[in-house]
Image (cartoon, rainbow, N blue to C red):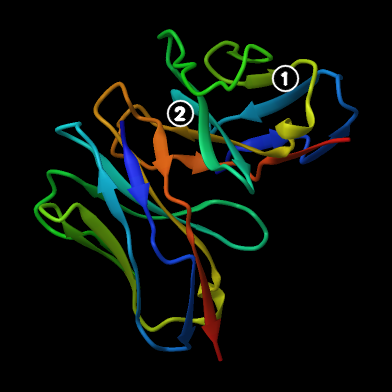
Amino acid sequence: GAGVSQSPSNKVTEKGKDVELRCDPISGHTALYWYRQSLGQGLEFLIYFQGNSAPDKSGLPSDRFSAERTGGSVSTLTIQRTQQEDSAVYLCASSSYDSDQPQHFGDGTRLSIL
Amino acid sequence: AQKITQTQPGMFVQEKEAVTLDCTYDTSDPSYGLFWYKQPSSGEMIFLIYQGSYDQQNATEGRYSLNFQKARKSANLVISASQLGDSAMYFCAMRGNFGNEKLTFGTGTRLTIIP
């Protein structure tokens, strides 16, 4: 079946602009995660959605970052007033409710801030 | 807080040999899970193998096995009969208790298989 889909695959934008990154999880997966991968920081957790529960936002680096998940499916990560340090690959993953199941990752969005 | 440590930034292994990638962890959660992911140069994260903290037997998936030593807090990945296609970054990751399923990743090991 279809895997986790992320769009766009690449995004180049100017400092100070807002960007939206989209994630379409595997059908039926109730959990959705956003991570960031950068050279200096490795792989970092950003935010986690599980069903109708309040999201775990503990990994968001600043209030410029926000995410929502509509209808328990598609998620959008928004970065406002982008800074050069926001340049990274943003990875989305989804999993079934059983926490012993692996998280399946999308191919990521490579974000470059000029 | 959870922590994953991978002490081998890079490894070179001859094709067809076995290789062990090291991973140690630290957590205060009574229940946790350990994962290994492969990231080729193309960038996708590929799930390899999973070990639950209460599993009695070491996990195996084809050529991959996980050497889980709970008392030593280690979860090393063993790849048997390495192939050129095994060249990639390998990440060890941990999830915590129920309600704390986010993954904490190690810094990774870059494995290069030599023909």
Q: Which residue: 38% across, 87% down?
A: B17
Residue at 72% x, 20% y is A79
Residue at horizontal 52%, vertical 36%? A44
Residue that carries the numbered disc 1 in the rendered image: A79
Decide: is B80 above or below B49: below
In three-dimensional space, the C-alpha distance between marks 1 and 2, rounded to whole angstroms, equals 25 Å
Q: Position of residue B15 (x, y in %)?
A: 48, 88
Residue B54, image x, y percentages: 12, 44
Q: Position of residue B3 (x, y in %)?
A: 33, 41
- N-term mark: 1 or 2: 2
Amino acid bearing label 1:
Ile
Is B26 displayed left or right of B35 in the figure? left
Q: In screen coordinates, is B73 left or right of B81?
A: left
Of B1 and B29, the residue lying toward us: B1
Residue A33 image label: none
Residue beneath disc 2: A29
- Chain holding disc 1: A
Name the image quarter holding residue A81.
Answer: top right
Q: Nearer the viewer, mark 1 or mark 2?
A: 1
